[in-house]
Amino acid sequence: MGGTAIEIAGAGPAGLAAAITLAGAGRQVIVHEAQGAVGYRFKRDLQGLENWTTRQDALVALQKQGLTIGFKRLPCRAGTVFDAWGKGYCIRSHEPLFYMVERGPGPDTLDTALLHQARELGVEVRFNSRVQHVQGPAIFATGPKAADAIAVGYHFDTRMPDGFWAICDDDLAPRGYAYLLVMGGKGTVKSCMFTGFKQEARYVERTVEAFQRLVGLEMIDPRPHGGVGNFRVPSTARSGTHAVVGEQAGFQDTLWGFGMRAAMTSGVLAAYSLLEGSDYDRKWRQELGELMATAAVNRALYSLLGNRGYRWLLRHQENRSDARELLHRYYRPSRVKRLLVPLARRRFESQRKDASCNHVDCSCVWCRHGRELHA
Ligand SMILES: Cc1cc2nc3c(=O)[nH]c(=O)nc-3n(C[C@H](O)[C@H](O)[C@H](O)COP(=O)(O)OP(=O)(O)OC[C@H]3O[C@@H](n4cnc5c(N)ncnc54)[C@H](O)[C@@H]3O)c2cc1C
């Protein structure tokens, strides 16, 4: 690798985390971003930085990874989740269940904080630069390429208080959940669905109606917004010689679509594998493999529940004291969950086929060689 600049395709959380780690170790880094700004596909989306997969607090974990926490965030310890019959269940945790953050190019967002940190370390970020091929050392971080789930709804301004609300109802969000997040006068309402994408408009309409009825949703100047998510445990997260990170590799929580932490973690791991000359596949399998497999099992089980099952789950959690503890246990690998991995594979097949290319001289950012080779 020597003194050659390392190129990174994609300035999402995964690509910027990789860039920060490499630049922090004194490497010259160029990040190519296809759009004119960071976080373009999210504009001003509110998202949750989950805080249950690790015992360590998510913000402490980010700092330990060498990443900034200089973004606006709202620690979320209590909210309400409704069942399909409109009954609300209180979700509480002693420590934050998640941190609400804003995405996109705005001044307070996660993406802007990462961009500033990268630039301060000397990373060159080239906007409107869509990469097709890379010859030298590189990391690919270009986000999702197929829709295993979609989240569709609105961004809006509001006078509602800060908070989070969700509804588990297959008539609003099939096999997923509808959610409403409010922070500092900005809101996001979405139906996050894992099937039935063709009926998305109907599900969004029902989601908005339900939140209006249940919590008095107020939307000022609503703007439609939506996006797709990719989930899979890849057989390899390499494309040719290059590490693939974040959602491009499929790294994301398969149960509910919390992908930011896996994106940043995989970016940091890929950077270290380049710096050390170590095996990236081995690194992500150690750090993310079991978590991803457990989340896939959770998804398979969740998709069997239906509205009555969601209601049972909500009642069950209400009798437990701490939602973060409960979720931590659900996401913890166990013998039973390991035994259920084959079931999960059958129940949930990613739309992304594993066409990763293993031949060494591949330089494609989005490799199709696997498909050609297997055709
Ligand atoms: C509506 C919605 C809500 C979500 N809510 C949550 C949530 O609450 N919590 C959570 O943790 N996760 C959430 N996620 C998932 C999370 O946003 C993603 O998992 C995360 O952003 C993935 O980061 P990434 O860096 O891998 O990809 P991205 O954030 O998609 O970044 C990839 C970047 O690469 C650029 N790019 C693409 N192709 C090229 C190319 N050829 N050359 C150069 N650049 C390129 C893109 O423009 C983009 O900026 C949500 C996703 C959606 C769609």
Image: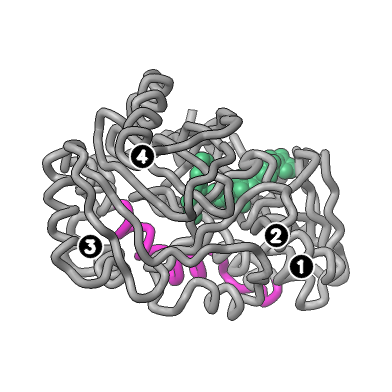
Q: Is mark 2 within 8 Å of ligand 1?
A: yes
Q: Amino acid at mark 1?
A: Gln
Looking at the image, residue 301 sits to the left or right of residue 361; the answer is left
Q: Amino acid at mark 4?
A: Ala
Q: Earlier in the sequence, mark 3 or mark 2?
A: 2
Tell me the residue that label 4 is attached to. Answer: 178
Q: Earlier in the sequence, mark 4 or mark 3?
A: 4
Q: Are marks 4 and 3 in contact (CB under 8 Å)?
A: no
> Start and end of the magenta stretch?
275-296
Q: Quadrant of the N terminus?
A: bottom right
Q: Position of residue 64 (x, y in %)?
A: 59, 80
Q: CA distance from mark 4 to mark 1?
A: 33 Å
Tell me the residue that label 2 is attached to. Answer: 16
Which of the two discs, 4 and 3, sits closer to the camera?
4
Looking at the image, residue 367 sits to the left or right of residue 121; the answer is left
Nearest to the observer: residue 149 or residue 137: 149
Observer able to see residue 358: no
Does residue 281 belong to the magenta stretch?
Answer: yes
Element type where label 3 sits in the image: helix
Q: Amino acid at mark 2?
A: Leu
Tell me the residue that label 3 is attached to. Answer: 338
Q: CA distance from mark 3 to mark 2?
A: 33 Å
Q: Position of residue 130 (x, y in %)?
A: 78, 38
Q: Is mark 4 within 8 Å of ligand 1?
A: no
Residue found 49% across the figure and 71% down from its top: 58
Element type where label 1 sits in the image: helix
Which of the two discs, 4 and 1, sits closer to the camera?
4
Q: Residue furthest front?
A: 159
Q: Are marks 1 and 2 in contact (CB under 8 Å)?
A: yes
